[in-house]
Image (tube, rainbow, N blue to C red):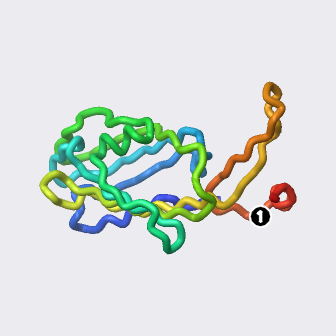
Amino acid sequence: MSIRLVEDVSDGTCVMERLEITLTPSLPWLGHQARWEMKGHLKEPVDLTRVTCNVIMKFGPVKMLDRTYRLPDLLEGMGARLSGDPRPAAGPWRQTWNLQLPDTVPVAEHRILLRARTDSGKNFLALDITLNFSHRYRPSPSPTSGRTGTRMRHGSHKSDPQRSADRP
């Protein structure tokens, strides 16, 4: 099933153009890593250490987060860091990050709006990210612990009668 989790909503004013994003796995699991690969073209040189990212996170109509981060700090909070030249010249650009997803989040469809700007105030890129954390499954008991944990998985999945029977 092909699902568009990340949508590039950048317009012609953005320094980043022709952005391609690959997320592996395409439906990442909470508590695990996701590989985020970005390829694009920079219209002008950018100091990535000074790019600011405004992150708005909503559950339905409720705004749960509205915060601005420097790009390196945002990545660090997710267990990643900038690689390569932090001040790339205009032209082809590529970054790959291994992001650590949180172990738990509230059960809901999350909309994350990320708007990034350069230190000179120009639009860098704009992303809309939709994650659905409303589906749960219960993994088999761990042979060592004998306990069953609850994990939530996101993405738009068809209803699984077996999984539905396990829900409280």
Q: Amino acid at mark 1?
A: Ser
Instruction: Estimate the x, y position of residue 86 in percent, counting from the top left.
Output: 23, 37
Give 168 or 85, whichever is nearer the viewer: 168
Where's the N terminus, which quadrant? bottom right
What residue is rendered at 17% in x and 60% in y? Answer: 122
Instruction: Estimate the x, y position of residue 12 in percent, counting from the top left.
Output: 24, 67
Instruction: Estimate the x, y position of residue 134 in percent, counting from the top left.
Output: 66, 61
Vertical side of 72 occupied by 146: above or below: above
Which residue is at the far left? 120
Q: Could you tell whether 87 is left or right of 167 in the image?
A: left
Q: Confirm whether residue 87 shows in the render.
A: yes
What residue is rendered at 79% in x and 29% in y? Answer: 145
Q: Could you tell whether 28 is left or right of 89 in the image?
A: right
Where's the C terminus, which quadrant? bottom right
In which image quadrant can residue 114 be found? bottom left
Task: Bin the neighbour count of mark 1 within 10 Å (Cα to Cα): few under 14, some 14-19, many 20 and up.
Answer: few
Q: Which residue is mark 1?
A: 159
Instruction: Estimate the x, y position of residue 89 in percent, counting from the top left.
Output: 17, 43
